[in-house]
Image (cartoon, helix red, strand yellow):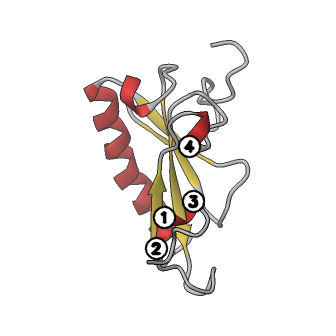
């Protein structure tokens, strides 16, 4: 697709037939990776079962790469589906965000923090 920054896999660090991995250009932590479909598809629910499986396969490979290069203490894995959920580039991508002890004061609740005030329960 023209003008889609994720349709070009030139920055790929890992790949398989249906998906690829690249470092996020605006990382929230050192080593932040994106796992993307090669085919331009807007969201997870539009991806084929084979594409979804390819993404999951690369999440594992991406974790191994991060363990070797960055040695994080934990991970957040997330997918934004649609503009109301924060998706700004309409090409399916999974965030693999390395987490480090002390990177935030209290990490409890993890991905629940996408809605302010709902992280802690």
Residue 12: in sight, yes or no?
no
Label 2–label 1 contact, CB within 8 A: yes
Find the distance from the CA under tag 2 to the CA under tag 4. 17 Å
The quadrant of the picture occupied by the C terminus is bottom left
Specify which label sits upstream in the sequence, 4 or 3. Answer: 4
Specify which label sits upstream in the sequence, 2 or 4. Answer: 4
- The residue shown at (58%, 70%) is 117
Task: Quickly name the residue at label 1.
Answer: 112
Of the pair 121 and 9, the residue shown nearer to us: 121
Of the pair 68 and 95, the residue shown nearer to us: 95
Task: Quickly name the residue at label 4.
Answer: 85
Find the distance from the CA under tag 2 to the CA under tag 3. 11 Å
Find the distance from the CA under tag 4 to the CA under tag 3. 10 Å
Task: Quickly name the residue at label 2.
Answer: 109
**Rendered position, 102 above or below 24:** below
**How far from the left and from the top, in percent, is residue 56?**
33, 45
Label 1–label 3 contact, CB within 8 A: yes
Task: Quickly name the residue at label 3.
Answer: 115
Residue 5: in sight, yes or no?
yes
Label 1–label 4 contact, CB within 8 A: no
**Rendered position, 82 above or below 62:** above
Find the distance from the CA under tag 1 to the CA under tag 3. 6 Å
Specify which label sits upstream in the sequence, 1 or 4. Answer: 4
Callout 3: SS: loop
Residue 55, image quadrant: top left
* 75 relative position to 52: left or right: right
How would you rate the neighbour count of disc 4 (Cα within 10 Å): few for under 14, some for 14-19, many for 20 or more?
Answer: few
Label 2–label 4 contact, CB within 8 A: no
């Amino acid at each position: 697709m023209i003008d889609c920054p994720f349709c070009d896999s030139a920055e790929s660090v890992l790949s398989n037939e249906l998906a690829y991995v690249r470092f996020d250009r605006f990382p929230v932590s050192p080593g932040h990776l994106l796992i993307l479909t090669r085919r331009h598809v807007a969201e997870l629910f539009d991806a084929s079962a084979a594409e979804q499986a390819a993404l999951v396969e690369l999440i594992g490979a991406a974790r191994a790469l991060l363990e070797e290069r960055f040695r994080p203490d934990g991970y957040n894995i997330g997918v934004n589906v649609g503009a109301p959920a924060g998706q700004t580039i309409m090409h399916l991508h999974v965030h693999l965000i390395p987490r480090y002890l002390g990177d935030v004061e209290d990490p409890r609740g993890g991905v629940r923090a996408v809605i302010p005030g709902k992280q802690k329960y």
